[in-house]
Image (tube, rainbow, N blue to C red):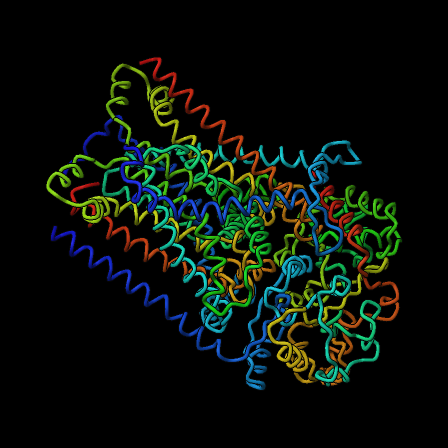
Amino acid sequence: MESWKRQPRLFSLLISPAIIWLTLFFIIPLGFMVGLSLSVQPDATHTVFTGTLESYYGILDRNPDTGDYIYIGVILKSLMIAAIVTFFCLALGYPVALAIAFAPAKWRPILLLLVILPFWTNLLIRTYALMSVFRVNGFFNNILAWVWNHSRFMLLGTYQPFDLLYTNTAVIVGLVYIHLPFMVLPLYTAVEKLDRSYLEASLDLGAGHWRTFFKVMVPLTLPAIMAGGIITFIPAFGALVTPDLLGGVNSQMIGNIIERQFKAANNWPFGAALSLILVYITFILLALQSWMASRRAKLDDIRR
Amino acid sequence: MRSYRSSYSRRSFIKHSLTVAATVPLMSQMAFAAERSVHVLNWDTYIGPQTLEQFTKATGVEVKYDLFADNSELFARLRNGNPGYDVICPSNDFIERMIQSDMLAPIDHSKVPNFANYDPRFQDASFDPGRQFSMTYFWGTIGIGFRNSQFATPPDSWGLLMGPESKVHAGKISWMSDPVRVINHALKLNGHSLNTTDPAEIEKAIQTLLAAKGNVRTLAGDNGQDLLLSTEVDLAMEYNGDMLQVKAEDDDLNYVVPKEGAELWQDCWAIPKGGPDLAAAHEFINYVLDAQVHADIAKEVNYALPNAAAIALMPEDYRTNSIIFPADDVLKSCETPRYLGEDIAKLKSDGMTRVRAG
Amino acid sequence: MKPKAPISPLEYTRRWWMRTLVAVVLVFLYMPIFAMMLFSFNDSKRTVVWEGFSLQPYRDLLQQQTLLDALGNSLVIAFVTTVLATTIGTMLAIALWRFSFRGKAVLEALNGLPIVIPEICMGVAIMIFFNAINWPKNLPWPFSLTSIIIAHTAFCFPFVTLVVRARLAGFDRSLEEAATDLGASTWQVYRDIILPYLKPGLIAGALLAMTLSLDDFVITFFTSSPETLTFPVKIYSQVRMSVKPYINAASTILILVTVAVTVAAAWYYQRAASRNGQK
């Protein structure tokens, strides 16, 4: 790595398009959104910037029936759902990444492709396809019903279909379904680059597979786990299509509420304020991740 | 070096062929751009299968047809200025809102002679005096769609969907997802007018919904009829025409307007300000209001025509269908929803957020 | 037949429980897609109940001029976005890899933002922005697509930067030093050594950008207008009601096309990488 001053023209050439794009089409729009969150809306179509914090105070609204915070409650619920989704993506994704990384070399690209392909379908179509599989009259239930009715289970009575849709569980399953490929990729890259001799040494020294996994592989791949975790957690947190389609009455997440502010409630300043809260939460999580990463780096240095 | 050169040229070949492949749609689009076109924003499944083609054949104007899913989405798209639509089809309360927000251009009645065919009841409207800005396309009711075989006696009250009696069919009920529609019918259930501006009455409606929401399977955007068809629910809050469309596929399904009354809506054509082609907009509206064209569309969508000349062209079973044309006593109990101001809209939307919380 | 070698401790993939797990996950991932493809042959106006095999949905699809237009728009936008995002992202990746400068950490963090920010925030922000600066509406096609292309590029190129940087991390600078010693100019070094090495990374990044652009719904929803509808936005408006078989047909075709492109690119990548003696 060299200082940019050694090749200033090349450096400016390389870096300027990105900086221009980021500033013009990302930072400035975010700035406008901050401005909108500090505005009021006197009538149906106009907003006026006044610097008021009214929208932010609105986030602290309480539910008159129960005294709970409405919006904060939904934010916390969305955080929890995102955490559960991330956990399951990790639990399913890590073994799959392992399987691909330890497969014979010629199988790896094919397996990777297989895992990534569903990701190429349109999100809405995939969600609707998920619905047609899991609904009461859908594939999953129909196949199970057929098996049930043609086997000895029939003696236990007619098949009762699983009631899988329109619940929080369905939303979680749907979100795992959508984000799984995003988790597998970074994990696979990290596991593939692992120095196998560490694992072999651990196994030779008598540690079982599980211990090797948790004490050797996981710590060595921790950066990838955290990266994959972030790419899964944050989109899951802000999801709106999946809870809308797969969820029941109680399954609204913060993304749905934000969307409602821009449509049914026609309250754009409040919608902007809620969106910004999401951005702030994202920042905090990123800062947390990089703080943890630098702490570990310092500890590694100390250990050395 | 040689291998790099040859792979370089192969890479640029791929790039070139991709560019050519991508310009083909570009060239065909640019060819069309030379002709006149009209940009229409309408509900889904709300036009005849041949209507647009026939319009283009009759007038030479191409139709760019876009869809929207609910009124507030339409409003959100147009709120910051017209992104390029000539003709839109909002419901009556949103027509009012857009008139008050100065978003609609007046319709020149001299350019829409087919409007004279209309039933006198629809030549004027409380939400648009003199029909300066809108012309009704179809009208109808909202009510309960249900599966006959699941009921000893057909349902006749909103209570079965939103009241304490909803327990009987718990888990097999669906509401709409539009906050205003749902809360309006809860108001009717409680015996209030759905156009009330009394916050106490609206609060009571929200409480009713909170008490019953545990029995609801899901809030269907606009596909309650599909949930009925697939037997996932037995009771759905739905539009009458949608129910007729699925009744054709499954005769066990039926529709009724509950005794407490319901919304009587009108979807109307309107011209948003700032559209690209005002003349084309008028041509389109006039064409759709033609008796035969309008009748053909009605055969497809099964909603009630405001167009007397078109009704005359419809078959007997359409004209006497009580689902399409409700009996007088039913009509008396129904109300046309009005635009009640931003505060009430916000109250109802926030109420829905509360209903769905937890 | 060669006798199978005994399973070594690390060959997880050969163990039955691992294979079962992977099979279950793959079934989970693919069952809905196959269901969708199957229902694209459904003989019904709605996809809710199977009513018989028919090619009618595919014929219907050809009638849906607006849907095909939207598909065309999506492809054009994806193509231009991929070119722009790959270029900008790669340039940034090279700069970040090679140079140190003040504010580098800030730029890296900034580059990470479009990746992590919730899509609805970005969509709303971009819509507000284009509105506030009175971006011209009613531009003739294809210039009407520029607002969407700009928005897509903005959130795609950071992904490309990530991928290309990962590839760059493995670059052996001694190659570059040898070339310079032999008299190559900076431009020649980039063209003949660094860029060919980057090719797999460029392809991966370009594919990623193309996917993200083709599939994007939330951000495009807020920036599109009637002339510039993309495929996902168009589907959303039709699919809120119920998925009609011809939409499944369009999606099936889209999947098959992207599979073909990916497989072709992957095959090309394998050949290029193995010919260059790298993995």
Front-most of residues C120 and C98 = C98
Write the residue at 48% across / 61% down. C248
Vertical placement of C233 versus C114: above or below? below
Quadrant in the rendering for residue C189: top left
Write the residue at 64% across / 74% down. B300
Q: Quadrant of the C terminus of chain B?
A: top right
- Residue B340 left/right relative to A146: right
Q: How many marks?
A: 0
- Residue B6 left/right relative to A272: left
- Residue B92 left/right relative to C62: right
Front-most of residues B168 and A293 = A293
Residue C149 rendering spot, x and y as whole percentages:
45, 57
| Residue A255 showing in the rendered view | yes
Residue A54 rendering spot, x and y as whole percentages:
73, 39
Quadrant in the rendering for residue A65: top right
Vertical placement of A216 versus C190: above or below? above
Residue B149 rendering spot, x and y as whole percentages:
71, 58
- Residue C94 left/right relative to B54: left
Residue that extends furthest to the top in the rendered view of this protein:
A303
| Residue A158 showing in the rendered view | no
Front-most of residues C236 and C95 = C95
Residue C35 rendering spot, x and y as whole percentages:
46, 55
Vertical placement of C4 versus B80: above or below? above
